[in-house]
Amino acid sequence: MSEQMKSLEFDVLVIGGGIAGGEAALNLANLNYKVLLVEKELSIGGKMIMLSKVFPTLDCAACITTPKISEIARHPNITIFTGAETRKITKIEEHHFEAIVLQKPRYVNVTDCTGCQLCEQACPVSVSDQYQYGLVGRKAVYIPFSIASPRAAAIDIENCTLCGACERVCPTQCIDFTQTEEEFLVTIKSIVVATGFDLFDPLKIPRYGYGTFKNVITSMQMERQLAPTRPYNTILRPGDGKMPDNIAYVLCTGSRDKSLGNPICSQICCMYSVKQAQLLMGALPMADITIYYLHIRAFGKGFNEFYAQAQDMGVEFVKGKVGKITEKENGNLILRYEDIEQGKVQEAEHDMVVLSVGVLPNQGISDAFENKKLELDPFNFINQADILASPAKTSIDGVFVAGTASGPMDIPDSILSGGAASAETTSYLRRALL
Amino acid sequence: MDVEKGKTAKYLKEKRPVPKEVTEQLKYFTRTKKSILNALKEGDKTIPQLAEILAIPKDEVVFQLMSLLKYGFVETGEIDDMDEYFYYKIKNDGKN
């Protein structure tokens, strides 16, 4: 352990600042516990903050997330580290854990940055914007996205030419290239793991042509195209900028497929595809939308009505497994699929294809635990040791799980799970006093 | 270390040379930006028209043009008669 390492003390460490971790942190902070929230991205808000609208209410995702994020960011009992990683977690005894938190350099002093974006304007570099899922460029110095929290610039040092243009225009002189990695030794009484999920990478299914056929996109890319802070002026094909009018959705891309190592249902793809189809019909009134599905799983409150609403709006549902996608010279795509109801192989042409990618475990956090094992389930999500009686309980007493770190779930369930984790954490912390 | 605020890039430059790919990428963007803006100075154009003039793939034009739209060099014009492709036009004479 380095001598310069700063020590910090909190009641609870929440790992992951998405909607589940945020909910847990907020509940605990409101009960007067001191919380450290560690987020690996440059902003809190997780995946929800990137979404257009939510199902089945079609509420604006940002309108729900932003006030909550703001409350978390301003809470006097919550300390937030963004662009940071939790490493080496050790359980010393009950109600006593130690962890190393690595703060990566942002090269911007967040407290001094006003978010004026003059640095962005001055930066000559343009690279792919990860927060728009590669659909458009961003500068090497950039505010991650308009509703980011903190709304402060960061420097992508891998792509920076170190020209210094940003520093010269910064009115508050908050850019600092001398920043280096910093490690903190954090002492806590309890931990909430809310590390969320990864999206399936469709490059693993070459027969769908993602990456090669530019008009085959992922559902998250379509989500960005539908959001008010979209990458393009409207919904366009990334292959040639044409407004699409015949869009296909391929459900279960990377889910319920043993050959890809993910045999389970992702729980959200049916409904987010139904949601996107409805939004597309609003944005492109002349467009035909076809959803190729295996089974529509509309299991939640108001979900089946939402599915029926899409059918009434004219979304076409085809029970079929798409085997292969090929591209025509004009960028249109031919879907070869097994029509399950007719029992034969068919082909259909669309001008854009959206792959409804599934939910995968965000692996790695279990490796951070040094002297106790954070057990995983057979699908590599965090194992819920007592799923019925105590759903947030993990294999380690004092470590609780919230949200999609424990398995695929939708937004209302993630928030509920964050609430459950905070309640169980409180119960654990109170036991220390008894 | 005495650090002069507003001039800190030089400290990192001493420790960390800029990779060649990064400078190449900068050159490519600057060149593409210039050719797109020059083509648009001649008149409003659609993405397929720009791809033909610049002799680069259409998807690359989409990416670069939409970046220029985001950075404020370009704005969206009317859609074509077939309701397929938008025209894009230069904004503020290509200065942002």
Image (spheres, coloured by chain):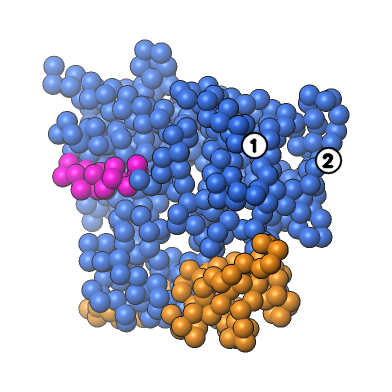
Chain colours: A blue, B orange
- In the rendered image, which quarter contains the C terminus of chain A? top left
> Splitting the image into 4 quarters, where does residue A329 fall?
bottom right
Magenta part of the chain: A64-78
* Residue sitting at x 22%, y 32%: A28
- Residue A123 seen: yes
Q: Is residue A347 left or right of residue A304?
A: right
**Magenta stretch contains residue A66:** yes
Indicate the position of residue B96 as horizontal and vertical percent values. Answer: 43, 80
Q: Residues within 10 Å of mark 1 (few under 14, many from 20)?
A: some
Give yes or no for contact between labels 2 and 1 (Cβ–Cβ under 8 Å): no
Indicate the position of residue A172 as horizontal and vertical percent values. Answer: 23, 74
**Magenta stretch contains residue B95:** no
Q: Which mark is drawn over residue A314?
A: 1
Q: Given the image, on which type of amino acid does mark 1 rest?
A: Gly
> Splitting the image into 4 quarters, where does residue B45 fall?
bottom right
Q: Given the image, on which type of amino acid does mark 2 rest?
A: Glu
* Residue sitting at x 52%, y 29%: A306
Q: Which residue is mark 2?
A: A347
Circle 1 chain: A
Indicate the position of residue A276 as horizontal and vertical percent values. Answer: 56, 42
Furthest residue in direction right, as rendered: A344
* Residue sitting at x 83%, y 25%: A342
* Dominant SS type (magenta): helix
* Residue sitting at x 73%, y 55%: A213
Q: Which mark is drawn over residue B55?
A: none
Q: Which element type, helix, strand or loop, lies under badge 1?
A: loop
Q: Is residue A201 left or right of residue A305?
A: right
Mark 2 and mark 1 on one chain: yes
Q: Does residue B15 sit above or below A421 in this rendering? A: below
Indicate the position of residue B58 as horizontal and vertical percent values. Answer: 69, 68
- Residue A258 seen: no
